[in-house]
Amino acid sequence: MFKSVRTFSSASRLSTRSKPLAFSNLADIKLRAPIAPTHKNFDVSPDHPLWAFFEGGNTSKAALRDGNDITQLEVRPWSMAELRRKSFVDLHQIWYQVLKERNIIGTELRLAESLEYSRAHHHKDFDEKLALVQKRIKVVLLERQTAYERAQLLDDVKQEYLEQFKQRYIEVDQANEVDMEEKLDRLQFAVFGIQPDLNDIDLEHDINVSFIKGVEYNAELKWGKHLQETGQNLAPLKSIVEQLPFLLKDTTEAVEEVIELRDSEVDVKMDKIDVIPFLKSAIGNFRGDGIEEEVAEDI
Amino acid sequence: MSVWGAYTKRFQRNMDKVVPRAIGKARLKDQNMYALPTLEQTHPTVPKSEQKTKPEQIGILAGDLAYISEGPQKGTISRILRYMPEYDGVLLMDVTSKKLLPKYSWMENQTTHVFDYPEITPLSQIKLAAKEKHEETGEITYVVADELEMKGRYFDARHKKWLPRRFVKNHDRVEIPWPAPEDPVGDADSEQTKLIATDSETALETTYELQTLAKPSIPVDVVNELRNPHSKYKKRYLSEYQARVMKAPDMPLSNAQKAYLAKKAEQEAKQQALHRGRPITNLSEEIQSFIGEKMASHINKIDNPHLLEHLEGLSAIEIPDFAATQQKIRDAESAEQKPEQK
C-alpha cells in the first residue's frame, strides 16, 4: 500500500540546477538597506471599505478602544416612541448606522478575545444597547404592517363612513365647498389610495381594484351633487368611461363630456378585464405621458 | 438576533446558556480558582432573565439609606452606593472588608496593599430607611420600612423619567421619596458622544404619518424578512405524517361486538324484505265511507259558489303521482284475484 522508498518527483528533478549558482559582475550589485517586515511598510488606500470596521475609519489610531472610554459615552438606545415617529427610510438609515457600529464592536471583541483583554464587558454592554435598537426597529415595522393588515378587514366601517361622507358632500353649502373638495381629495388617498395630484399616480402599481372603486365613488358623489343642484333627472353613470372624467376634470367639464357621450350614443359598456388597461392609457394620455417620447422619436 | 459578544464555540459548552443557579457552587469554585486571595467571589450570580432593572422592581436606588437586618452589621443604617443586578445585592458605604490589592491596581494616593473594599450585601438582608428631622426640636429620627408599596406614577424631573410613588406598606401617609440621581458616569458633551449620538431635535422629528389605508406603510419585500414565510404554522395543508397523527386509528372489534353487529344486520335485512314485499291495497269500505262523510260535511258547509267552482276545477285535475298510485292499487288487486281464479 505505502511506498517504502521515497523519491523526488520527476518535475522536481527536472527543475533542479545542473550548474551551481554563481554571481557575475559583483561590482555592479549595490546593496540596499533591508526592508523590515512590518505593517508600516504597507500603504492602505484611505477608501478601503474595511476601514468601516474601525472606530474613526481611516484615521483610527487603535483597533481596540479602552473599555473605560466606552463607559464615557453618554448614550441610550432609541426608544419605541421615538422610532414610531420615523419613516421607513429613516428607520432603514438608523438600522445601518447601528449595524456599522456593531461591526466595529464585533471587530474589537474578536481582538479582545485573542488578547484576553479584561475590560471587554464594556464593549458587550454597549453592543446590547445597539442590538436593542435593531430589535425595536423590527417591532415598529411589524406594528405598521399588522395595522395595515387589520385595516383591510374594516370594510363595514369604511362603507359606513363613505355613506356618511356622501350625504355631507351632497348637502354642503356654498361657503364650505372648497373645504369639502379638499376633504374629498384626502379621503380618496386615505381609503382608495388615489394620489391627489394626477402626476403622482404610478400607472404600473397604483391602478388596482381599490383605485377603480375610488373612481366610481368620486364620480357618484360629483354626479349626485350636480343633479341635486340643477334638479335634472338624468340616469346614473353607467361605466368607467363615464366615471373617469370626474377624476380628471372639473365637475362642469365632466358633466358636459358625459352628456356629449350619451348624445353620441357610443356604447360605453366595458368588460371588467379591460378596465385597468383603459384607465392606464386614459390617465397616461391625459397627462401627456406618451407625447414627449413621440416627439423625441420624431427628432 | 444575537449579541456579538455572546459568540459560541463549537466544542465548548456555552456557559451563558446554563442557568447559574443550576451549577451554583461549582461555578463559584471555578471562578475563584484564579482569584487573588481576599478577592474571592462569595455571592452566586442571578440569571440575566431574572435580574431586576427597574427602580419599581428593586424598590431602592443608589443614594437611599438602608437598615441592615441580618449579619454582623445588624442594626446599622448606611447609605447605598450601588445596586448590582447580577448579584441582587447592594454596595453599602459602611460594609467593607480589608482586601489585599496588588500594586498594579492601586488607586491614586494609595500607600499600602490593604484596602477597604465594599462588600456586597444581599437585598434580602436590608430594609429601606429614611431620615426625618423634627421641625421644632431638630431631632433626627429614622423610619425603617419593613415592606414597600408602589402607588401611582409621576414624572420625576431629576431622573427624567416616570417613577411610582414609594410608600411604607399599610401606611399610606408615610411616603419615602426617591433620592436624587447620582452624577452620570458618561460625558454627554464629549466629542465621542457627539459623534455617536443623535441630537434631540433630529430624534424627535416626525417623519412618518399614516395617510392611507389602501397601501402598506412598508415595502412588500421587507415583510418576508421580518416574518418567517416558511413557518410551519402558516402552511395551509397538512403533510401525510401530520394527517396520520391527527387521525385516530380504527380500533379492532371484539368477537362479541362482531356477533352483535352481524345479528343486527340480519334483522335489518329481514325487516327490509318484509317491507319490500308488502302489497299496497285499497282502503276498506268502512274507511272510504268515513272519509267520504267527513269531506261531504265540509263541502256542505261551503256557501260561496266561487269556492265550490274552484274545488270542482281542482278535482278535475289529474295528479300524476295519484294516478300512478291508483294504477299500483289496481295491479295489486288483479294479482290477488289471479291465484283465486286458478
Image (cartoon, rainbow, N blue to C red):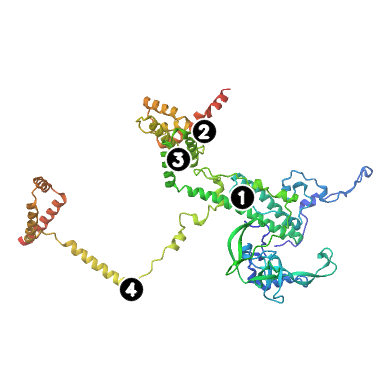
Res B145 quadrant in image: bottom right
The residue that label 3 is drawn on is A209
* Vertical relation: B18 (above or below) B219: below
CA–CA distance between discs 2 and 3?
18 Å
Q: CA distance from mark 2 to mark 4?
A: 81 Å
- Discs 2, 4: same chain: no
Badges 1 and 2, same chain: yes
Type of amino acid under label 3: Val
Of discs 1 and 2, which sits in the foreground?
1
- The residues bearing labels 3 and 4 have C-alpha atoms spaced at a distance of 65 Å
Residues tagged by mark 3 and mark 4 found on one chain of the structure: no
Location of mark 1 (residue): A82
Left or right of B52? Residue A248 is left
Q: Position of residue B57 (x, y in %)?
A: 61, 64
Helix, strand or loop at disc 3? helix
Looking at the rendered image, the disc whose residue lies closer to the viewer, 3 or 4, is 3
Q: Which residue is at the front of the view, B322 or B279?
A: B322
Q: Are marks 3 and 1 on the same chain?
A: yes
Answer yes or no: are tags 4 and 1 on the same subunit: no
Q: Quadrant of the C terminus of chain B?
A: bottom left
> Could you tell me which residue is drawn at 43 percent across and 43 percent down?
A161
Q: Amino acid at mark 2?
A: Leu
- Which residue in the structure is indicated by mark 4? B255
Vertical arrangement, residue A4 with respect to residue A213, above or below: below
